[in-house]
Image: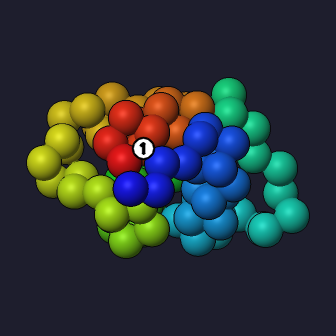
Amino acid sequence: MNVLNSAEIYARLLPLLHQSTSRPLDAPVSPDDRLEQDLGLDSIGFLTLGLYLEEAFGLDIGADVEAYGQVITVADMVDFVAQRI
């Protein structure tokens, strides 16, 4: 089993966030950024990001949709992924 550390998850998550939010690739994203308020991730973007996460990390978001809905920041998302891979 290939276990990723938080820095590796963060690095793999950044392009997925950019794809989900239409932010320029050179726009900075910090762990403290809030997905909705700071990055502009709307409900469709949140669902799209979930699909990207499933593909990139082999997750089953549908099995833990309640916890996924509690993710607020980029750091929360890293923790969410880390606990499920």
Quick check: 76 left or right of 50? right
x and y percentages locating residue 46 in the rendered image: 40, 54
**Residue 37 visible to an observer of this rendering:** no
Q: Position of residue 14 (x, y in %)?
A: 66, 57
Q: Secondary structure at mark 1?
A: helix
Q: Please name the residue that numbered disc 1 is placed on.
A: 81
From the top left corner, tell me how far across and down residue 74 is, in percent. 58, 38
Quadrant of the snapshot with the N terminus: bottom left
Image quarter of residue 80: top left
**Residue located at (37% from left, 35% from top):** 83
Q: Nearer the viewer, residue 22 or 75?
A: 75
Which residue is depicted at the point 37% across and 48% down?
85
Q: Is residue 47 left or right of residue 5?
A: left
Q: With respect to residue 72, does 36 lie above or below?
A: below
Q: Residue at x 22, y 57 (%)?
A: 60
Percent of width and height locating residue 9: 58, 49
Tell whether 76 sits left or right of 84: right
Residue 16's quadrant in the figure? bottom right
Residue at point 45%, 68% (across, down):
56
- 75 left or right of 84 in image: right
